[in-house]
Amino acid sequence: MNISESVKPVKRPEKILQYGEGNFLRAFVDWMIDILNEKTEFNGNVVVAQPLEKGVADMINAQNGLYTTALRGVQDGKTVEEFRTITSISRCVNPYAQFDEYFKLAENPELRFVVSNTTEAGIAYNAADRLGDRPQRSFPGKVTAFLYKRFECFHGALDKTLTFIPCELIDKNGEALKGIVMRYAKEWKLGEAFIAWLEACGFCNSLVDRVAPGYPKEEAEALWKKLGYVDNLIDMAEIFHLWVIETKRDYSAELPFDKAGLNVMWTDDMTFYRARKVRILNGAHTMTVPAAFLCGLDTVEECCKDTLVSTYMKKGIFEEIIPFMEGSETELIRYANDALERFANPYIRHLLLSITLNSISKFKTRCLPSLKAYIQKKGKPPKVLTFSLAALIAFYNGRLVNGEMTGSRKPGEAYPIKDNQEELNRFAAIYKENGAADGLASNAPAFNAQNIAHAALSFADWWGEDLSAIPELEDAVAAHLEGIWKNGVRAELEKVAA
């Protein structure tokens, strides 16, 4: 029996529009809204817009928006497992195939909030976007056109503005989204009245924290038996959750998370919380994953069990990140230890490959601030963070065919490299120009590590600056690349972790 045959969907007003149908939002925001519906008078559903042309909208609709969250972890030394059937999603619309249906959502008078998770690369300007596109290429372009449609539909009524709470892991995500939307509004000449209406919309900055690896493929059938129904969208996540929302306005009455017992913080300054989470928890992931994966590991838990990789990760956190952050060092260390305990959660199979998605933008956001802070105080590049940059470059050594890139960590074992097409194209060109004539480099003597390091680090569009201009950094990255290709990742890792 399928979940849609076992559980009845609950019809409620669609109060939230969500850009993104992936594992995280369904195990985080939609899970919270489900609890709000149960424990408070919120009484609202989420309507999901698929942000890319390909996604899981059809799967979600086939189950009437229903799915199960499976939360697992260890609390106070005890195993905790929580299952919840989520009924907060009403439907999922694909703007690329159902544009008119998607655009009609702007006419809903009960719509109040918009949440999103389009990855770190999602909140970006695209000069090719136009108002008449069906839909626009970029997420902010879609938002601008959607808001203009709503503005026209309700004749600029101030009580029909929307409040945005983005979940993308970039600094000041709400402000960044608003800035690009305003840019489009001016470039598309949408008028001063619309721009004033946009100012009345809320754009909150937000910080999210929960590991959600998603569908547990290997144990899905066992879980179906336990649940009593087939669910092709079971969403696995850890027990821990935290949502910090920065805003000058008070939305707590409309979204009464506190009354539902949820770990949501409303604040007028999230600087400390964001730096702590992004640089320690996310930074540890990003600096560890490429090297660990190339070593042959597949999950975050395996990283914690592997003595060498675990030592490397802890050295990076406690010697190169925390000492160069603002705030209470005692509190930062406590948070780091809690994060390491979460990483070792035996119930969460957090795949390293899933973390490598858009690694360029992730490194810029999560690791580059720590690397630069270390250099500013020490006057030289940090060992772990510098090696992590080399490992990232090595990870992007792949063969590009029909727009898709694959690497190889050992003969016969290919892996997908997922990033924006521009990043993939540039890396393919860098490797081809420096000894990888077949599109995939190996331990070739002709491989020019110095040139590859320079080409990658000097491309300011990736990092926001020319990293090759930082003294000693390029040479150190090149030396690590040379070591990786001559002796293997693990051998080079041993030198760094020592």
Image (tube, helix red, strand yellow):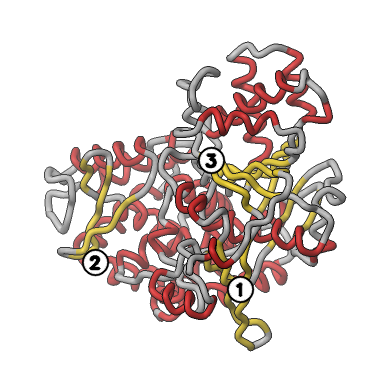
The residue at the point 53 percent across, 59 percent down is 283
The residue at the point 80 percent across, 64 percent down is 39
The image's mark for residue 93 is 3
> In which quarter of the view is residue 187 placed?
top right
Tell which tag, 1 or 2, sits nearer the viewer: 1
Q: Position of residue 387 (x, y in %)?
A: 38, 59
Left-right relation of 447 to 454: left
- Dot 3 falls on a residue whose secondary structure is strand
What residue would you read off at disc 2? 488
Q: How far is the residue under mark 1 from the one under mark 2?
A: 43 Å
Observer able to see residue 268 = yes
- Dot 1 falls on a residue whose secondary structure is strand
Q: How far is the residue under mark 2 from the one under mark 3?
A: 46 Å
Q: Position of residue 352 (x, y in %)?
A: 40, 64
Considering depth in this image, is 276 or 3 the residue closer to the camera? 3
> In which quarter of the view is residue 279 placed?
bottom right
What residue would you read off at disc 1? 83
Q: Position of residue 324 (x, y in %)?
A: 62, 59
Tell me the amino acid under the disc marked 3. Val
Tell which tag, 2 or 3, sits nearer the viewer: 3
Query: Does 22 sit above or below residue 318?
Result: above
Tell me the amino acid under the disc marked 2. Gly
Query: Mark 2 or 3 closer to N-term?
Result: 3
Q: How far is the residue under mark 1 from the one under mark 3?
A: 26 Å
Tell me the amino acid under the disc marked 1. Phe
The image's mark for residue 445 is none
Query: Does 104 sit above or below residue 294?
Result: above
Q: Position of residue 453 (x, y in %)?
A: 31, 46
Observer able to see residue 208 = no
Left-right relation of 389 to 175: left
Query: Mark 1 or 3 closer to N-term?
Result: 1
The residue at the point 36 percent across, 47 percent down is 474
